Image (spheres, rainbow, N blue to C red):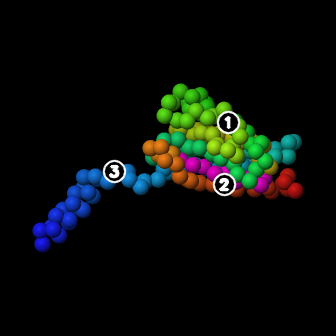
């Protein structure tokens, strides 16, 4: 009987005092994707807008199934902010998004454009929380104009 009481007290204390902390918690963020066609160059650009960082420390994007020629274009100073923040991997100069990717957001309102997409790629967006990363969202580039054909 005493053992059951001790177990129940431990469970209640865990919930009340939040002794579990953030164990097992995944990074989360709210983002939106906006795709545009470049008819002169016959490729696509996708804007990634960070609506809310929620609990993520930073966001990192990669491009898969592409030719490796996707390029980043930071439109709100994300690159400068990342370089000034020692807690964020400083890989914003990495234009090869098919490898480890590059940081695309560290605060709400950041807008990053990924250019030179041919319409067969998938953009994967990862969030980092306390050094651990997990997939938050992904976007399949649509080839509405038939550039990849």
Residue 37 appears in the rendering: no
Question: Is label 2 or label 3 in front?
Answer: 3
Q: Which of marks 3 and 1 is nearer the N terminus?
A: 3
Q: Residue drawn at (53%, 52%), measured in percent from left and top? A: 134
Q: Is mark 3 on a helix, strand or loop?
A: loop
Q: Which of marks 2 and 3 is nearer the N terminus?
A: 3
User: Do the CB atoms of the residues marked 3 and 1 lie less than 8 Å apart?
Assistant: no
Q: Distance between the residues labelled 1 and 2?
A: 20 Å
Instruction: Give percent across and percent down for residue 114.
Output: 70, 42
Question: Is label 1 or label 2 in front?
Answer: 1
Secondary structure mostly seen in magenta is strand
Which residue is the site of mark 3?
21
Q: How far apart are marks 2 and 3 (CA)?
A: 32 Å
Magenta range is 119-127
Q: In which quarter of the image is residue 103?
A: top right
Q: Which of marks 1 and 2 is nearer the N terminus?
A: 1
Q: Which residue lies furthest to the left in this view?
A: 2
Task: Give the number of marks.
Answer: 3
- The reply, left or right, for residue 80 in relation to residue 95 is left
Q: Distance between the residues labelled 3 and 1?
A: 34 Å
Q: How crowded is mark 3: few (under 14 residues within 10 Å), some or many (20 or more)?
A: few
Q: What element carries label 1?
A: loop
Q: Residue drawn at (71%, 40%), measured in percent from left and top? A: 96
Residue 139 numbered mark, or none: 2
Which residue is the site of mark 1?
94
Q: Does 70 appear above or below 142?
A: above
Q: Residues within 10 Å of mark 2 (few under 14, many from 20)?
A: some
Instruction: Give percent across and percent down for residue 3.
Output: 15, 68
């Amino acid at each position: 009987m005493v053992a059951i009481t001790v177990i129940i007290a431990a469970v209640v204390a865990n919930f009340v005092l939040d002794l579990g902390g953030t164990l097992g918690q995944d990074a989360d963020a709210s983002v939106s994707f906006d795709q545009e066609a470049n008819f002169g160059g016959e490729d696509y650009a996708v804007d990634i807008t960070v609506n809310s960082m929620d609990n993520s420390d930073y966001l990192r994007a990669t491009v898969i199934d592409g030719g490796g020629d996707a390029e980043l274009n930071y439109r709100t100073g994300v690159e400068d902010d990342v370089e000034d923040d020692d807690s964020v991997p400083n890989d914003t100069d990495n234009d090869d998004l098919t490898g480890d990717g590059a940081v695309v957001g560290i605060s709400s309102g950041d807008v990053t454009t990924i250019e030179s997409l041919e319409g067969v790629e998938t953009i994967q967006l990862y969030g980092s929380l306390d050094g651990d990363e997990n997939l938050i969202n992904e976007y399949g580039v649509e080839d509405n104009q038939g550039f990849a054909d």
